[in-house]
Image (cartoon, rainbow, N blue to C red):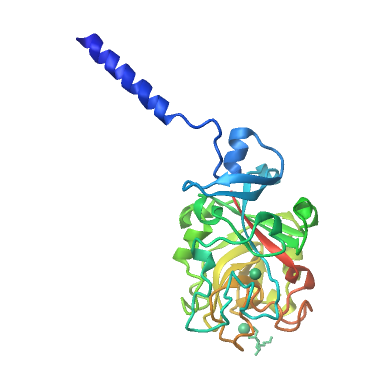
């Protein structure tokens, strides 16, 4: 009798282990998984698969600080004179209006756009942005229209977090921005900024980072951080402050992405690169950013 039971148990567990076996070709969910399972060491484009079965191609940085970084998005400014028009997917393509406070809502929805190869020539967002559970973020500033093979070489500023801060905010930016909506009138400055996280520089340093912004901006920010969901004097919301922590409330000159409404001189400050051109395009004077940072795409990675 006992033998029969043992046999049944053995058969059942054999069956279970057969069912649980992974397919021959396991498609990784992130560049980190790709690196760990296959010992992949080359930077470049790879296919990843989301748990719902979406297959997509993206860029993996397999070398910086141990590698395993997945490109999940790029914020590209196609026309700073556009002011929340076509191409402003990370703010609003619907002209700034208080009636559309979230704008296009890309920071906290599952809409995807663009492709990895064109990440420096147009906006890019892939399923990894909302699917991957990560700990840290890396940012690359790469001149517009550079080809994939030259991104690393031509990037003039790169930094990453090391504190695993994403663990406290749902594991990715999609979840972080559910907690801190990129939405006009979601809060006030300085009380309601999202987290400012220290960064380590892989290319450039804090002082070089700071000089990419005009003198008035430098007086209102501290470099060496990345800040999420900043709010300005007029309660406009921005998604990411580029290597800086705001000390004042004119965050529209160093933070990118946004909600659908920027009240000051509306719609002059509305767009993916908000008000980087307040004192002229690329002048690096007053509140204006340098030509270098204005003409470069911001690539966002997770690990
Ligand atoms: C250092 C000059 C202050 O200038 C003010 O800031 C000016 O009144 C506004 O036009 C300007 C913007 O709010 C900057 O964001
Ligand atoms: Ca854009
Ligand atoms: Ca202002």
Side of 301 where 134 appears, left or right = left
Q: 239 or 243: which is nearer to us?
A: 239
Number of on-image labels:
0
Quadrant of the rendered image containing residue 295:
bottom right
* Residue at far left of view: 1
Residue sitting at x 57%, y 52%: 136
| x, y percent for residue 53 | 49, 46
Q: Is residue 156 above or below residue 260?
A: above
Q: 93 or 197: which is nearer to us?
A: 93
Q: Is residue 257 above or below residue 157?
A: below
Quadrant of the rendered image containing residue 242:
bottom right
Q: Is residue 20 above or below residue 276?
A: above
| x, y percent for residue 180 | 47, 67
| x, y percent for residue 230 | 55, 72
Residue sitting at x 52%, y 81%: 235
| x, y percent for residue 12 | 32, 22
Q: Quadrant of the N terminus?
A: top left
Quadrant location, ligand no. 1: bottom right
* Residue at far bottom of view: 265
């Amino acid at each position: 009798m006992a033998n029969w039971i043992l046999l049944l148990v053995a058969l059942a567990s054999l069956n279970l282990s057969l069912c649980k076996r992974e397919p021959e070709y396991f498609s990784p969910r992130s560049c980190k998984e790709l690196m760990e399972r296959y010992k992949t060491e080359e930077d470049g484009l790879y296919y990843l698969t989301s748990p719902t079965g979406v297959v997509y191609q993206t860029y993996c940085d397999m070398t910086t600080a141990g590698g395993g970084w997945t490109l999940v998005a790029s914020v590209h400014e196609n026309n700073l004179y556009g002011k929340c028009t076509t191409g402003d997917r990370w703010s609003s393509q619907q002209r700034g209006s208080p009636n559309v406070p979230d704008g296009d809502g890309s920071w906290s929805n599952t809409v995807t756009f663009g492709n990895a190869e064109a990440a420096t020539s147009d906006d890019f967002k892939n399923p990894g942005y909302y699917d991957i559970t990560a700990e840290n973020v890396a940012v690359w500033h790469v001149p517009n229209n550079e080809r994939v093979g030259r991104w690393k070489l031509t990037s003039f500023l790169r930094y990453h977090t090391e504190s695993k801060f994403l663990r406290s905010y749902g594991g990715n930016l999609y979840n972080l921005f559910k907690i801190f909506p990129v939405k006009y009138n979601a809060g006030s400055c300085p009380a309601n900024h999202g987290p400012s996280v220290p960064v380590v520089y892989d290319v450039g340093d804090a002082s070089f980072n700071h000089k990419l912004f005009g003198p008035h901006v430098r007086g209102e920010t501290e470099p060496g951080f990345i800040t999420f969901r900043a709010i300005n004097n007029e309660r406009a919301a921005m998604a990411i402050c580029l290597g800086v922590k705001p000390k004042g409330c004119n965050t529209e000159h160093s933070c990118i992405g946004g909600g659908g409404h920027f009240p000051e001189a509306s719609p002059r400050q509305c767009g993916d690169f908000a008000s980087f051109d307040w004192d002229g395009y690329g002048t690096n004077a007053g509140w204006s950013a340098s030509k270098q940072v204005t003409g470069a795409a911001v690539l966002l990675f997770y690990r």
